[in-house]
Every structure is written in C-alpha cells, then in structure tokens.
Image (cartoon, rainbow, N blue to C red):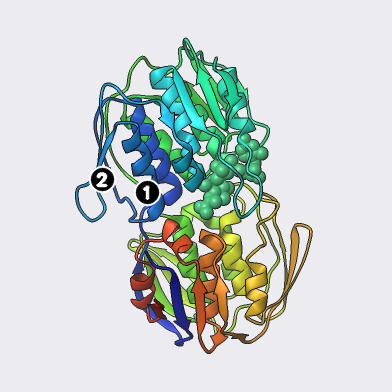
Amino acid sequence: MVHSLRIRPGGALHGRIRVGGAKNSVLKLMAATILARGTHVLHNVPRISDVDYMAELLRSMGLSVQWLGPDSMEIVRPDAIVSEAPYELVERMRASIVVLGPLLASEGMARVALPGGDDFGPRPIDMHLRALEDLGVRFTTSHGFVEATTDQLVGANLLLEFPSVGATENAMMAGVLATGTTVIDNAAREPEIADLANFLNAMGGSVTGAGSSTVVIEGVTSLHPATHEVIPDRIEAATFLAAIGVAGGEVVVERARIDHMEMLVTKLVDMGMTIDQTPEGLAVCGPERLRSVDVATLPYPGIATDYKPMLVAMLATADGVGIVTENLFAGRFRYIDELVRMGADIRTEGHHAVVRGLPQLSGAPVKAPDIRAGAALAVAALAAEGETIISGADHIERGYEHFVDKLSGIGVDIAVAQ
Ligand code: EPU
C-alpha cells in the first residue's frame, strides 16, 4: 500500500493515458451479483482498493470473487449466502450500503451495519430506507445495525426527496425482483445508474428510463448471471483533464467519453482547454495558463461534486477569481486548508469558496483527506515550485488504479515517497 507520494512540476504533459472502469459503477454491479445464482463476469474492472473491499464483503457473505485477468473478475453467487454486512467492512467503505436492496430482493432479509459519516460530513441513508419501506420492507435499527425483512417486495411508486445515487440504486436492485411495477421518480441520472440498469437487464430484468429522472422497473420472478463491461470512470478522466489543464501539453485520454461529462467539458473549454472526442477517447490540449470560471456542483447532468476538488486546484493557478459553490456535501472543503498550505489564495464561507488564482503555488508536505481531494492535491502539485509530498495517499488508491504509473506515462514527475 502506498502511503506518501512525491510530486515535482515537470513541464507540459504528452502522450496517452488510459481511463479504467468506473469505481462508482463497479461497486454496485458487484453488489448486484447477489441477485442471481451462478457465475457472473465483469470486464474493465479497476484495480482499486474499494473493489478489494467490496470483494471482501461479498466473500464474507459466501460469494466467491476472483480476478480472471488484469481487469476481468468472476463472481460466483452460490445457492446459500449469509445476509449480513458486518461493521468492520461497512465502516471501511460506505458504498457497502448498496448490498441492502439486493439482499432483501433475493433473501427477504438483511442485517447491515449502519455506515458512519466520513471526511466530508454526515451521510444519512434515510432515502434508501424510505424507498425500500415503500416496497414492503420493515426495518428496525439496534446496536448499530439495520435489520430489514420482507415477506414479498411489492412494486410501488417511489418519489425521492433528492436524486440520491445510492438510494436510486438500492431501489432499482430491490424493484427488479418485486411483484408488479416500481416507478422511481426524481431518480439520480448519473451514467453509473444506466450502467447498473444495463447489467440488471442483461440478467433478465426489465428496467427502462435509467439515465432520466423516471426509472420504471417491471418486476420479474428470477434473474440469471450475466457478463458485462463496466463503463469508463468519468471522475478519473476528469482528474487527468485537470492535470493537463494545470501542466499544459497535449494528451489523448483513452476511453474517456464526452457524453458522460458534457457540463464539465464545457467548463474546461471556458477555462481555455481544447477537448475533442475521437474514437479512442478525448484529445486534450492545455493552455499556457487557465482562465478562472465560477462553478456550482449539482446532481448529474450538473457538475459533479467529485470533480470539484480538481476544479478548485485548477482555479488556484488560473488567471482571475472563481467562485465555487458546493450544493451536495456540506463539509466537502476540507482539502482547501492543504491547498492553502501550498500557497493557494482561497477563502471559504459556508458552502462557497472564493479562489484567487496565482501563477505558481509552493510545494509542501500535505495530507490527502479523501480520494478526490488527494487527487486534487496531486494536480495542484504540478503548478507548485519545488516538491510536494502527499501523505495519506492510500486514500487515492481507493479510487485510482496505477496512479503513479499512469501519470508518469504522460510525463508527470511522480513517485512513491516511502
Ligand atoms: N443523502 C441523504 N439521505 C440519503 C442519501 C443521500 O440525505 O438517504 C444526501 C447525502 O448526504 C448527500 C446527497 O444526498 O448530501 C447526495 O448523496 P448520494 O446518495 O447521491 O451519494 P452516494 O450515493 O452516497 C455517490 C458516490 C459519491 C458521489 C455522490 C454524489 C458512490 C460509491 N459514491 O455517493 O462518490 O460523491 O454519489 O454524486 O457511488 C467518490 O467517488 O469519491 C464519492 C464520494
């Protein structure tokens, strides 16, 4: 496991960098294998620690998970499984909560540890529970666990208070084996939701409308195992775009899809970048110096909250002043203190940050508070004079595969520091 990274600015970037499978899709696809007995195969699976954590969780339930090659994974779901997600595993990865829907759909019961908050604030699961309750689940919570049972899931009209990604996914994975029709209104519209729907349909489910605000699920009586290729990780792609924006140069970001990140690409073009879709991915060109823009995070298709740390790092070295507004996670500004240690001029007020761009930052020892913030510090280091040492880099490994090798491949001066 990597604990610290050392990065020095190395000039403009050149060459090709390949985007892996989407973390926020594959974790849910892995959970969805609980729904059908037999052997599933997932391709384009990223080699990240969150995938290892989800594999461990599935193994603890009795499924067998193994790599078939560099990025293919076989998951065998046996007849009998243990319908429980223990605290030690849920505590490590909050996304574990997505096993709730599939366990209820296939076993009629589940005992899942309650996830705590994380480094960017409290993260409740009330919308997950409300949606499942509407489908006929009874819940009790005690001793830090949610205990859920149902005699039969029954399709229903669900209206989400907010287009929550996880609540939409849990409701889809429960609704797919419910009797009758489930309609999810105000559903999350992320590309990862459509990827999950495609996997469920490949398993024999009937899900339409995924990617729009209304997802319709006709319940089926059983599902069969499937083979599926995970969509590319748009947030990893955005991180590479940010690096090219800050360092300059010309790079092909292989497999990246503009249709999954249109709003972000529009912003980056406003900042002075050139980004074109080609059959291989995105042909990207960084300017001499970025121009500042204002940014507000919103649910998809708005600018994702996960892009924001990268955008703040870009604005820290851009020409002008940018105002950044966080609308999804209250506390997601913690990495800004680290950027300020690198000389950035950033003030925060409630859920807004005012970023005054400087031509250069100053390399410093900094700490990665979470996955995306860690990646953003690496981006900022490309415009920092001297050396930046990022500790807590194991956070980066939760969501980025071969981070050092991939960035070195386009000319970033990056190495493991210990
Ligand atoms: N929320 C509630 N109640 C709920 C569920 C969510 O109040 O029952 C609130 C959250 O606290 C938050 C907002 O609704 O303020 C959005 O949360 P959402 O449920 O959409 O997020 P999530 O499913 O928990 C996924 C990604 C996050 C990403 C968000 C938003 C995964 C594993 N995680 O989380 O990704 O930031 O959607 O797009 O899919 C990351 O990759 O680093 C990451 C944190």
Question: Which of 189/115 is in front?
Answer: 115
At which x and y percent is residue 152?
A: 47, 11
Above or below, 102 against 405 in this view is above
- Quadrant placement of the C terminus: bottom left
Question: Which of 275/360 is in front?
Answer: 360
User: In what quadrant does ligand 1 lie?
Assistant: top right
Q: On the image, which quarter does residue 282 sit in?
A: bottom left
In this picture, residue 219 sits left or right of residue 358: left
- Determine if residue 93 is in view: no
In this picture, residue 224 sits left or right of residue 49: left
Residue plotted at (48% across, 58% down): 235
Q: Secondary structure at mark 2?
A: strand
In this picture, residue 280 sits left or right of residue 391: left
Q: Earlier in the sequence, mark 2 or mark 1?
A: 1
Q: Secondary structure at mark 1?
A: helix
Q: Which residue is mark 2?
A: 73
- Quadrant placement of the N terminus: bottom left
Of the residues shown, which amino acid type is indicated by label 1? Val
Q: Are marks 2 and 1 in contact (CB under 8 Å)?
A: yes
The label number, if any, that marks residue 302 in the structure image: none
Question: Which of 353/261 is in front?
Answer: 353
- Determine if residue 155 is in view: yes
At which x and y percent is residue 57?
A: 38, 39
Q: Which residue is mark 1?
A: 51
At which x and y percent is residue 373?
A: 56, 64
Of the residues shown, which amino acid type is indicated by label 2? Met
Q: On the image, which quarter does residue 332 sit in?
A: bottom right
Question: What crowding class fits label 2: few (fewer than 14 Cα within 10 Å), some (14-19), or many (20 or more)?
Answer: many
